Image (cartoon, coloured by chain):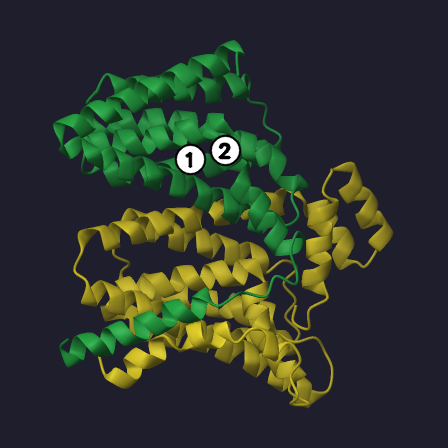
Amino acid sequence: MHLSRLMFALPVALAICAVAIDPAWAHTGEGLTGGFLSGFEHPITGWDHVVAMVAVGLWGAFLGRPAIWILPIVFPLVMALGATMGLAGIPLPQVETGIALSAVVLGLVVALAFRAPIWVAAVLAGVFAVFHGYAHGTELPESADPFAFAAGFVIATGLLHVAGIAFGLLTKWPAGSVAVRTGGAAIALAGVAFLTGIV
Amino acid sequence: LNPIIRWLLFAPFWLFSASAAWAHSSATGMAAFYEGALSVYTVPCTLIALVGFGLILALQKLTAERAWQAFAAGGLVGLGAVQLGLDIADPELPLMALGLLAGLFIASGVALPLTSALAGGAVLGFFFGVISAPHPGPVAAMVLTALGALISANVLLFYVAAVISFVIGKFQYAWLKIGLRVAGSWIAAISLIVLALDLSTPAIDEAIESDTGSIAEDAAASAGQARWLRSNDRRLASPTR
């Protein structure tokens, strides 16, 4: 291996090993840790949130640039606005319906390979982000630590988008495109199940 | 990069790996310094605003040095102003607003003009200095606490700016810059939520600041925010503001 490569690879490897060392789990469940974990778990333990976030990533990947990065930027920002509405006590009707509808609509646009203009995609994702953010915001004051809760659910949301984008990159291949569109259809069906109360 | 600097960039990982042995420092008299240094990482609004500013420094190399100088000068002015009697009721609000602005700038990919970068750095430094000003006490302890906060903040800025700058420079992948913009949107989103929460609970903060604990407890309980109150208590119990 070339010396300069070794000089780069070695500190990186050591850094990874250092981080991998067993952490001290002495303080868990309260304060920042508890708040972060409860915030992080909020989107990923609610299937209605999971499928919608993944669908945003899938659609972004399907549309390609610039949607692939604009949607994951727009969504958390507008979601934060929704959370702010929830915190301020501004009434928003039919929050759960809006969340379920987001899965139906976003799943359908992926399933139908709907190539919307970027502003339409951003507005659509943004509208649904309000409902998801509102749901997070109304639960935020109950958390162990508000900052940690907010950081947790924003990061979890972003990572779900990344998961969707990663899966959506399969659209480069014909078979992958079919798989992604099938995934979109499954998301839409799950949304219908949420909407009708089956799940 | 120089191999020494390259190794230094990864030094924090090695420090963090030695977790258990650092629980109780054997160096007496240094508690004030450590507490000042740690306050940077335990006050969320400070941490997120500094990380946002560090990312801006990394992305805007041309203005980074002068913006950093403005931050340092602002920090000293803020620390000094508090000692001269300046009393800002809630310095967390402007810090959160600055974190929000920083996140929005990073997410939008808009290059910050030099004057804005200088002004932003100075204002951030000022409010950082205000929130990091030590409570009245022995002069030596106050100086050490302030010194700890200043050094810690600048070390954090160095590592965020240097690591990100190094990674962007080393690996010319387009998705790295996109990832940073996404991270900027996360910073803005978190700042906005916490800012909204702070603005929506002024009565609780007021009660805590005036040291009427029972009123604050009642207010928080009625609003279902007892845990938020506890986090405020913990913040206020720290040696800095």
- Name the residue rendered at 66%, 88% in the picture: B26
Q: Where in the figure is residue B17, as x and y percent of width and height?
A: 49, 73
- Name the residue rendered at 29%, 31% in the picture: A58
Q: Where in the figure is residue B37, as x and y percent of width and height?
A: 56, 76
Would you name the residue on which mark 1 appears? A78
Mark 2, chain letter? A
Q: Colour of chain B?
A: yellow
Q: Are marks 2 and 1 in contact (CB under 8 Å)?
A: yes
Amino acid type for the residue under numbered disc 1: Val
Closest to the observer, B171 or B35: B171
Residue A133 - label: 2
SS for callout 2: helix
Closest to the observer, B217 or A132: A132
Q: Where in the figure is residue B50, as x and y percent of width and height?
A: 45, 64
The green one among the chains is A
In this rendering, the answer to whether A165 lies above or below A48 is: below
